[in-house]
C-alpha cells in the first residue's frame, strides 16, 4: 500500500509539472511571437491537472489535491473542441496518419484449443453379479491397451447353479428345456463368451475373466485382489483413442457466425508447421462466464495414435468476406472500456477525439460502423499522447447519440468515507481505499449523479459510496449512511 501511494503521488506530481509546462511553453501549442511571456497572456480559467473538467475563474489551491491551480490560456494549442500541433512537432513525436477507407474484411478467428478424450467413445466394465476377485492382471490407469485385454479374474458363485442346470439338460434332447436353461444363464448376468465356453467344454465355469471391450486408455481401474464385489460395482473405465476432441475457446462476440461443419485448421504446440484440418462437430450451448468464450468442438481422427489429449493448439477459423464497410487500422482505436475513440485530423493541424462504433476486426484492420466518413484522416500512431493531452485539458469529445452508442452499464467501485463538505451537486469525502480501482484513501471532492442522492446527509457523517469511472473522472452513483453498531 505504501508503494502504491508513492507511485500515485509521483504520477500526480508529474501530471502537475506537465500541465505547468503545457500552459507556458507546450510543444502542442500554436506558435507565438518570441517576445510573448506568460505574464502577458490572459488566462481563460484555472484548473487542477488531476481533475481538468472542473474550471475555476481565479487562481488558488485545488480543492481536490494539495497543489496550486494551473492557468489555461486561449492560445495553448487548441480550444474546447480540439488540439493543434505544429507540423514539426508532430514529426518529432513520430505521429503517423491513416485514411479511412471503404473495403471488405476477410475475417478469421484466432483461438486456442486443447485436445481432450472423446467422451462418446467410452466403455464401463461393471460386476454383473456378486463375486470375489481372485486375480488382477498387470494393468494400471493410463495404460493403453487393445480390445480383449484381461483385467481381472472374478469368482461368481451364483452362476454355478445355472450352469449345472444347463449341463444336466444339454443331453436330454428336449430342446425347449435346453433353450430355457441357456436363457437362464443370460438372465443371471453371464456374458455370451462365458456361456459359449460352458457349451464347448461341458464343464462348470464359475470364474469370469473380465476383459476390455474396446481398445484405448484405462481411465479408471478399481479392482484389487481379494475384493468382494456387489452387482453393478464399477471395475474399470476405458476411453477409446481412435478419435479425439479439439475443444476451442472462441470469444463470444466472434462465435455468432460459426456453424456446424465450419472448416478449422490447427497447429499443435511443438508440432512444427504441420497443419491438422477438421470441421466443427458441435457448438456448446453455454458460454463461460469468466472468460466470456464459447466452446467449439472438433472431432479429429487419431487412428495413428499421434494426437495426445492435453496438448494445446493454435487454431484458425476462416470466415467469408464481409460486406463493404469503413476500415481503419486497429492500432488507431483507443478503447476505454466504456467507448471507443479515434483522434480525427481536422483543419489547420488540429486533432479531435471522436467516438466511434466498432464492427468486426481482422488482422490489423477493424470496421467502423458509425462516427467517421470515408476519406477522413485519423492518427494511427501517437494518438495516446494526444488523448492524454485532451484529457489533461478537459477537451470535449465528439460523442455519438445515445441511440448509436452500445448500451453498457458502468462498473461501480465501493468505498467508505466521512463527509467533510456538501453543496448542491458535489460532496467532499475523506474516503478509504477504492480497492477495485487500486486507489488509496485520500480527501477528494466528487460530483454526484443526482442531487437527490445528497438529501438527508450531514457533514461529519460516515457513508458508503459507489462511484463510476468515466471520461471526466469519478462520479458518485450510490450513497448511503453507514449504520454504526450500538455499543454495549
Image (cartoon, rainbow, N blue to C red):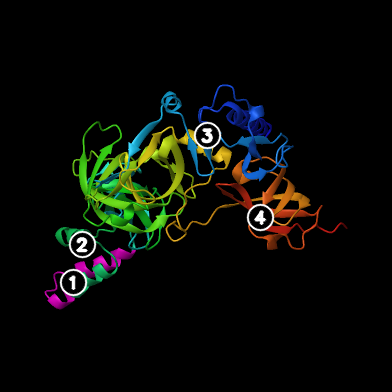
**What secondary structure is marked by label 3?**
loop
Spatial CA distance of label 3 from label 2 is 91 Å
Residue 122 picture quarter: bottom left
Which is more toward the observer, 186 or 72?
72
| Vertical comparison of 442 with 201: above or below | above
Viewer-side label of 2, 4? 4
Q: Nearer the N terminus, badge 2 or badge 4?
A: 2
Residue 336 in magenta stretch:
no
Q: Give the residue pinned by disc 3.
A: 77
Q: Give the residue pinned by disc 4.
A: 448
Q: Is residue 407 left or right of residue 105?
A: right
Q: Nearer the N terminus, badge 4 or badge 1?
A: 1
Residue 110 appearing in the image: no
Viewer-side label of 1, 3? 3
Tell whether label 4 touches label 2 (CB within 8 Å): no
Q: Which mark is residue 169?
A: 1
Q: Nearer the N terminus, badge 1 or badge 3?
A: 3
**What secondary structure is marked by label 4?**
loop
Q: Give the residue pinned by disc 2.
A: 192
Q: Nearer the N terminus, badge 3 or badge 4?
A: 3
Residue 377 appearing in the image: yes
Few, some or many residues within 10 Å of mark 2 (<14, 14–19, 20+)? few
Q: Position of residue 356 (x, y in %)?
A: 41, 49
Which is more toward the observer, 261 or 459?
459
Amino acid at each position: 500500500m505504501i508503494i502504491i501511494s508513492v507511485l500515485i503521488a509521483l504520477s500526480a506530481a508529474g501530471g502537475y509539472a506537465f500541465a505547468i509546462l503545457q500552459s507556458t511553453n507546450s510543444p502542442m501549442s500554436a506558435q507565438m511571437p518570441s517576445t510573448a511571456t506568460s505574464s502577458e497572456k490572459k488566462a481563460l480559467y484555472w484548473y487542477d491537472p488531476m481533475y481538468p473538467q472542473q474550471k475555476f475563474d481565479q487562481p488558488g489551491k485545488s480543492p481536490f489535491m494539495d497543489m496550486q491551480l494551473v492557468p489555461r490560456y486561449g492560445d495553448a494549442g487548441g480550444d474546447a473542441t480540439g488540439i493543434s500541433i505544429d507540423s514539426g512537432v508532430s514529426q518529432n513525436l513520430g505521429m503517423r496518419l491513416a485514411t479511412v477507407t471503404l473495403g471488405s474484411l476477410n475475417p478469421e478467428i484466432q483461438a486456442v484449443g486443447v485436445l481432450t478424450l472423446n467422451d462418446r467413445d467410452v466403455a464401463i466394465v461393471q460386476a454383473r453379479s456378486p463375486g470375489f476377485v481372485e486375480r488382477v492382471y498387470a494393468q494400471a490407469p493410463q495404460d493403453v491397451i487393445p480390445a480383449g485385454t484381461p483385467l481381472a479374474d472374478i469368482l461368481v458363485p451364483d452362476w454355478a447353479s445355472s450352469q449345472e442346470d444347463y449341463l444336466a439338460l444339454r443331453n436330454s434332447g428336449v430342446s425347449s428345456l435346453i433353450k430355457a436353461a441357456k436363457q437362464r444363464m443370460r438372465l443371471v448376468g453371464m456374458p455370451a463368451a462365458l456361456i459359449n465356453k460352458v457349451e464347448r467344454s461341458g464343464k462348470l465355469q464359475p470364474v469370469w475373466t473380465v476383459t476390455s471391450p474396446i481398445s484405448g486408455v484405462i481411465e479408471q481401474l478399481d479392482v484389487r485382489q481379494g475384493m468382494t464385489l456387489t452387482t453393478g460395482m464399477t471395475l474399470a473405465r476405458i476411453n477409446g483413442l481412435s478419435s479425439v476432441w479439439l475443444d476451442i475457446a472462441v470469444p463470444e462476440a466472434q462465435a455468432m457466425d460459426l456453424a456446424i461443419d465450419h472448416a478449422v485448421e490447427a497447429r499443435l504446440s511443438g508440432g512444427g508447421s504441420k497443419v491438422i484440418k477438421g470441421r466443427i462437430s458441435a457448438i456448446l450451448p453455454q458460454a463461460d462466464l469468466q472468460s466470456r468464450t464459447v466452446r467449439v468442438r472438433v472431432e479429429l481422427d487419431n487412428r495413428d495414435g499421434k494426437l495426445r489429449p492435453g496438448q494445446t493448439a493454435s487454431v484458425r477459423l476462416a470466415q467469408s468476406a464481409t460486406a463493404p464497410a469503413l476500415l481503419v487500422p486497429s492500432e488507431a482505436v483507443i478503447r476505454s472500456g466504456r467507448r471507443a475513440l479515434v483522434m480525427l485530423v481536422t483543419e489547420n493541424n488540429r486533432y479531435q477525439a471522436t467516438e466511434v462504433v466498432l464492427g468486426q476486426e481482422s488482422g490489423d484492420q477493424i470496421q467502423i460502423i458509425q462516427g467517421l466518413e470515408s476519406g477522413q484522416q485519423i492518427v494511427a500512431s501517437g494518438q495516446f499522447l494526444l488523448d492524454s493531452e485532451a484529457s489533461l485539458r478537459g477537451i470535449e469529445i465528439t460523442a455519438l447519440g445515445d441511440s448509436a452508442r452500445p448500451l453498457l452499464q458502468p462498473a461501480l467501485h465501493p468505498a467508505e468515507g466521512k463527509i467533510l463538505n456538501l453543496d448542491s451537486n458535489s460532496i467532499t469525502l475523506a474516503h478509504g481505499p477504492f480497492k477495485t480501482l487500486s486507489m488509496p484513501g485520500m480527501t477528494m471532492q466528487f460530483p454526484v449523479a443526482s442531487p437527490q442522492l445528497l438529501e438527508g446527509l450531514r457533514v461529519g457523517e460516515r457513508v458508503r459510496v459507489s462511484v463510476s469511472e468515466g471520461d471526466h473522472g469519478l462520479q458518485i452513483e450510490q450513497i448511503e449512511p453507514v449504520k454504526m453498531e450500538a455499543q454495549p
